[in-house]
Image: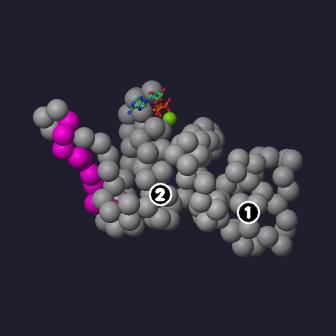
């Protein structure tokens, strides 16, 4: 899985044999996901984010509800992504609502925030 690989969405065609992907370049022209409650929007986004992270494509997630962020971390954990120490360095989890972790004011470099992560 590499940075320029197409993003794999699933399978289509007879017996679902054909992979269905979208080129990475297409996503840079914006994309939105709509659907009624419980139709799988968050799960779909989780898959895309995990694929981006595994391929080394930089991505950010702003999640006011926190469930998608937690599910994404759990997904990465379940596939063994964090067994690689460098992978831990690449994922920054920041939860401004936590009062038991104080972010030092001199911590201007966001890369040091991972050390404050309660999830890793
Ligand atoms: N591709 C899938 N295969 C199996 N189960 C799925 C799939 N996509 C979603 N689900 C399941 O369907 C349920 C609803 O999915 P999800 O939370 O992603 O929906 P949502 O559209 O984000 O809902 P909401 O509008 O409430 O935020 C979850 O239990 C999820 O695990
Ligand atoms: Mg959702």
Which residue shows up at 55% across the image and 58% down it?
Answer: 60
x, y percent for residue 80: 55, 49
Question: Any mark on residue 40, and which?
Answer: none
Tell me the quarter of the picture where residue 104 sits. Answer: bottom right
Question: Any mark on residue 54, and which?
Answer: 2
x, y percent for residue 21: 27, 52
Quarter of the image with the N terminus in it: bottom left
Q: List the residue tagged with mark 1.
A: 113
The kind of secondary structure element at disc 1 is helix
Q: Is residue 107 above or below residue 39?
A: below
Instruction: Tell me the magenta residue range.
Output: 16-24
x, y percent for residue 84: 59, 60
Tell me the quarter of the picture where residue 26 sits. Answer: bottom left
What is the crowding at mark 2: few (fewer than 14 residues within 10 Å), some, or many (at least 20)? some
| Nearer mark to the viewer, of 1 and 2 | 2
Q: Residue furthest left?
A: 14
Asked whether 72 falls inside the magenta stretch, the response is no
Q: Is residue 100 left or right of residue 58?
A: right
Q: Is mark 1 within 8 Å of ligand 2?
A: no
The kind of secondary structure element at disc 2 is helix
> Which is nearer the N-term, disc 1 or disc 2?
2
């Amino acid at each position: 899985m590499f940075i320029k690989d197409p993003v794999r969405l699933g399978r289509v065609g007879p017996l679902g044999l054909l992979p269905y992907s979208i080129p990475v370049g297409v996503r840079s022209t914006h994309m939105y996901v709509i659907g009624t409650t419980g139709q799988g929007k968050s799960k779909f986004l989780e898959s895309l984010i995990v694929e981006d992270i595994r391929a080394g494509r930089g991505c950010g997630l702003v999640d006011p509800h926190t469930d998608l962020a937690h599910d994404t971390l759990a997904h990465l954990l379940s596939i063994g992504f964090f067994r690689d120490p460098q992978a831990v360095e690449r994922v920054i989890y920041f939860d401004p609502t936590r009062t038991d972790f104080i972010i030092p004011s001199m911590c201007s470099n966001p890369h040091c925030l991972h050390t404050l992560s309660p999830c890793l």
